[in-house]
Image (spheres, rainbow, N blue to C red):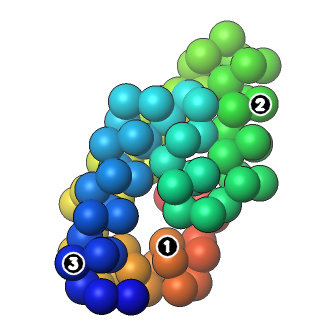
Amino acid sequence: MAQSEAGSKKLMAGLLGILLGSFGAHRFVLGDTKGGLIRLAISVVTCGMGGVIGLIEGIIYITKSDEDFERIYIKEKKAWF
């Protein structure tokens, strides 16, 4: 994946994690449908409090370098934090 493409995916996933983390939108953007559905289910069960997970993940995504983000979340497909 090109460096600028990884950077834009990182920014998109980070912002979606912060803004729509309770819906798992950031995981869907990364191609992790199962992870997105799990986060959505957690938010339903906890009446939206599961959105804190998305907020934390979004902040983590944005603070990673483009290279680290691509390696960890795109190539290795790390599922949690």
- Of the numbered discs 2 and 1, the one sitting upstream in the chain is 2
Crowding near pointer 3: few (<14 within 10 Å), some, many (20+)?
Answer: few
- Please identify the quarter of the rendering in which residue 68 is found: bottom left
Q: Residue furthest top?
A: 47
Q: How many discs mark residues in the rendered view?
A: 3
Residue 8: x and y in percent read 27, 64
Per the model, the C-alpha gap separating discs 3 and 2 is 32 Å
Residue 2: x and y in percent read 30, 88
Residue 73: which disc?
Answer: 1
- Please identify the quarter of the rendering in which residue 45 is found: top right
Per the model, the C-alpha gap separating discs 3 and 1 is 15 Å
Residue hosting label 2: 41
Q: Secondary structure at mark 3?
A: helix
Image point 21% across, 78% down: which residue? Answer: 4
Q: Secondary structure at mark 2?
A: helix
Q: Secondary structure at mark 1?
A: helix
- Of the numbered discs 3 and 2, the one sitting upstream in the chain is 3
Per the model, the C-alpha gap separating discs 2 and 1 is 21 Å
Residue 41: x and y in percent read 77, 30
Q: Amino acid at mark 3?
A: Ser
- Of the numbered discs 3 and 1, the one sitting upstream in the chain is 3
Residue hosting label 3: 4
Image point 33% across, 63% down: which residue? Answer: 10
